[in-house]
Image: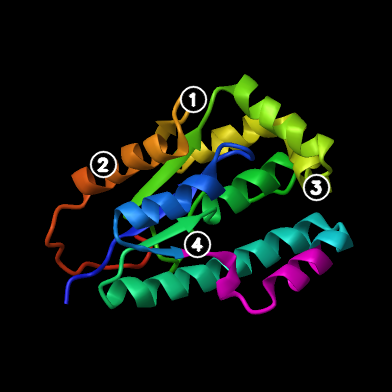
Amino acid sequence: MTRGAFITLDGLSASGKTTVAPLVAALVNGVHLTDDTLPTFPRMRAEVDAGGVLPARFHWWMMANHIKSETARALTESGRTVVVESYFPRTVATHRAMGHDCAPEYPSESLVPDVAILLEVDEQVRRDRIRRRAERGALSYWHQREEPNVAESTRVYRAFGLVRVDGTGRTPEQVADVIADIVRSRIPEPRSERATSHDRN
């Protein structure tokens, strides 16, 4: 059986990840794997966030990513294509921006994406979206803590070598089309089975 592809979308807050990810999954006939794969995710996240301890939050999100990694591994090995929004790069980028010391790399034995996308938009567009979130009370303490140092987040994303896609001036559907075309160009059919663990080379 051929493996399915593993596709991830990362990027700064308000870059459009949550909107675009399910559209990409539909275009590539894939599964949109969300944080709901972790039982009681909303309650656990609320408790960790409320604690206000940066290292604890970092390790909790790493744990959540490992669960997504193993779930995605099982699905891709069964032949399904999987799309994940916000994976290890986002966890590392956001927490480094907030002051936590962590290396910009995928953990050993984690499932490394076949196509890893960095979704970007013009910074003024992104800031306008952030402002609107703040006005309706939808900007969390942690987002507010990251925002002053998003330059560090961006450096981390680029250190991961993600494929940059600019969503400025495009509808979510158009952005999803661009990403789906990238996926098709990089993952020809049929695909042969290959190793799924992190290769440090």
Residue underneath mark 2: 181
Q: Residue at x 80, y 40 (%)?
A: 145
Name the residue that disc number 1 marks: 168
Residue 130: image location, x then y, percent: 72, 33
Q: Percent position (x, y) of residue 24?
A: 38, 50
The Cα–Cα distance between marks 2 and 3, rounded to whole angstroms, is 34 Å
Q: Is residue 73 visible?
A: yes
Q: Is residue 46 magenta?
A: yes
Q: Which mark is residue 140?
A: 3
List the single residue furthest toward the right: 51
Which numbered disc, 4 or 2, marks the residue closer to the eye?
2
Q: Is label 2 in a helix, a strand or a loop?
A: helix
Q: Residues within 10 Å of mark 3 (few under 14, many from 20)?
A: few
- First in sequence: mark 4 or mark 2? 4
- How much space separates mark 4 and mark 2, taking CA atoms? 28 Å
Residue at horizontal 83 percent and vertical 46 percent from the top? 141
Q: Amino acid at mark 3?
A: Ser
- Residue 200 seen anywhere in this rendered image of the structure: no
Mark 3 secondary-structure assignment? loop
Would residue 94 be counted in the magenta stretch? no
| In-front residue for pair 173/14 | 173
Q: Nearer the viewer, mark 1 or mark 3?
A: 1
- Residue 124, above or below 105: above
- The quadrant of the picture occupied by the N terminus is bottom left
Residue picked out by circle 4: 107
Tell me the element at label 4. Answer: loop
Q: Residue at x 55, y 49 (%)?
A: 18
Residue 146 in the figure: left or right of residue 73: right
Mark before the other along the chain sequence, 1 or 3:
3
Q: Which region of the structure is painted magenta?
A: 33-48
